């Protein structure tokens, strides 16, 4: 959650600073997820694995379940909270998220394994949509789920662009 999102949600900046510094805790590295997917031949097993990934995520603190963190364009309720920090001049973004749907919570976990804890420019260079397709998720999930995943990616990219713009303003 950015400071402005915290203000809109009625939280002060000290509450935002208390966010977990490892928001993707409980989520395996993306390479491990890809390897595990390749070991599962049946789609029922892959669905169960995606759900298991979601169950393994750390719970989203209640402070982050606000309209400012809700992802628009998802059929299910999805929240993504962003915490930028600066490593020198480079903004690094940590994300935490949740959904009210088990399969979507697993998709959030996959997405966060790709982007959380990464510099903003790496987030913008990443292609989570290609990974989504490479894992076969697009063809095995409903169009609404695929569109929701795209909405999550768009939200994360917007947060990365905002962090870079903030850096540019603060450096000048």
Image (cartoon, rainbow, N blue to C red):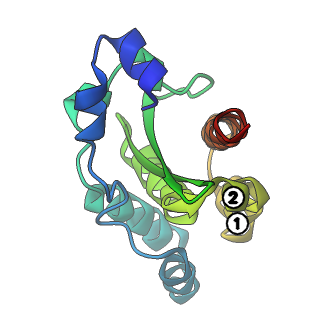
Q: Nearer the viewer, residue 139 or 114?
A: 114
Local crowd size for mark 1, using a 10 Å CA cut-off: few (<14), some (14–19), many (≥20):
some
Image quarter for residue 75? top right
Identified at 54% across, 69% down, the residue is: 43
Q: Nearer the viewer, residue 7 or 72?
A: 7
Q: Secondary structure at mark 1?
A: helix
Q: Secondary structure at mark 2?
A: helix
Q: Position of residue 109 (x, y in %)?
A: 44, 57
Q: Position of residue 69 (x, y in %)?
A: 45, 26
Q: Position of residue 169 (x, y in %)?
A: 70, 32
Identified at 43% across, 55% down, the residue is: 106
Image quarter for residue 45? bottom left
Identified at 45% across, 32% down, the residue is: 78
Q: Is residue 107 above or below residue 101?
A: below
Q: Nearer the viewer, residue 15 or 23?
A: 15
Q: Is 10 displayed left or right of 115 in the figure?
A: left
| Image quadrant where one finds the N terminus | top left
Q: Position of residue 86 (x, y in %)?
A: 52, 52
**Residue at image mark 1:** 131
Q: Is residue 110 above or below residue 83?
A: below
Q: Nearer the viewer, residue 19 or 49?
A: 19
Image marks 2 and 1: residues in contact by CB distance under 8 Å: yes
| Image quadrant where one finds the C terminus | top right
Local crowd size for mark 2, using a 10 Å CA cut-off: few (<14), some (14–19), many (≥20):
many
Q: Is 94 displayed left or right of 13 in the figure?
A: right
In the picture, the disc for residue 41 is: none
Identified at 64% across, 59% down, the residue is: 137
**Residue at image mark 2:** 128
């Amino acid at each position: 959650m950015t400071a402005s999102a915290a203000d809109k949600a009625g939280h002060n900046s000290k509450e935002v600073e208390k966010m977990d510094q490892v928001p993707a805790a409980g989520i395996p590295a993306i390479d491990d997820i890809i390897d595990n997917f390749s070991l599962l031949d049946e789609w029922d097993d892959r669905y169960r694995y995606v759900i298991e990934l979601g169950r393994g995520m750390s719970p989203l603190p209640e402070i982050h379940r606000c309209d400012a963190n809700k992802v628009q364009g998802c059929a299910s309720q999805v929240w993504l909270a962003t915490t930028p920090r600066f490593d020198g001049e480079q903004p690094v973004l940590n994300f935490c998220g949740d959904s009210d749907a088990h399969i979507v919570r697993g998709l959030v976990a996959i997405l966060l394994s790709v982007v959380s804890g990464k510099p903003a420019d790496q987030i913008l260079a990443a292609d989570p949509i290609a990974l989504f397709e490479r894992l076969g998720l697009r063809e095995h999930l409903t169009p609404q789920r695929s569109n929701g995943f795209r909405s999550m990616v768009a939200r994360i990219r917007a947060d990365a662009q905002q962090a870079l713009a903030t850096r540019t303003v603060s450096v000048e």
